[in-house]
Image (cartoon, rainbow, N blue to C red):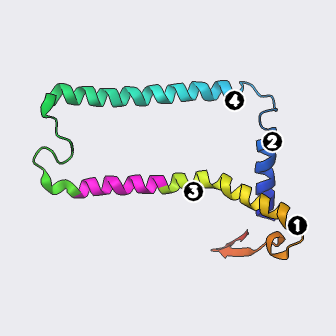
Amino acid sequence: MIIDDFCERDYLCALFGDTLKSTPPECKQMKKADVLGITVMAGLFLACGGLGYAAFGDKTPGNILTGFGFYELFWLVDIGKLCIVIHMVGAYQIVAQAFFLIVEMGAKMMWPDSGFVQKEYPCRIGKSDIQF
């Protein structure tokens, strides 16, 4: 039941979200937020690159963390790579939710009389119940 309500709410929000009036309009607000975010990140990256080149010139090592004689810091690079993997796994779960919604809605339309597809499956996690 909870998943059905969640999916129906998301489906309705997707259908009618752009027709609702609000102040300020979401498109203008998001455009400002996107421009601000991209500008800040571009400025940060350009400052890091420019200051690094100004400080070291052509002798800038390929790997800043381990390029100055601290060869035992490869564990630091590995931790950085692990953080990227964790970030990408979380981002995948968010992006995949739209795909799962489409598959679930398609299965419900294709097999409306199926007890397996239409039935809610309760799952207890800790002290809370979740319906699947």
Which residue carries the number 4 mark?
26
Query: Which element is circle 1 on?
Result: loop
Mark 3–mark 2 distance (CA, rounded to whole Å): 22 Å
As helix, strand or loop, the secondary structure at mark 4 comes to helix
Q: Of marks 3 and 2, which one's residue comes earlier in the chain? A: 2
Give amino acid for label 1. Answer: Pro
- Name the residue beneath numbered marker 1: 112
Q: In this view, does 19 lie above or below 74?
A: above
Q: Mark 1 or mark 2: which is in front?
A: 1
The magenta segment: 75-88
- Quadrant in the picture for residue 128: bottom right
Main SS of the magenta part reads helix
Q: Between residue 92 and residue 80, name the one nearer to us.
A: 92
State yes or no: discs 4 and 2 in contact (Cβ < 8 Å).
Answer: no
Q: Where is residue 4 drawn, in percent x and y?
A: 80, 61
Q: Nearer the viewer, mark 1 or mark 4?
A: 1
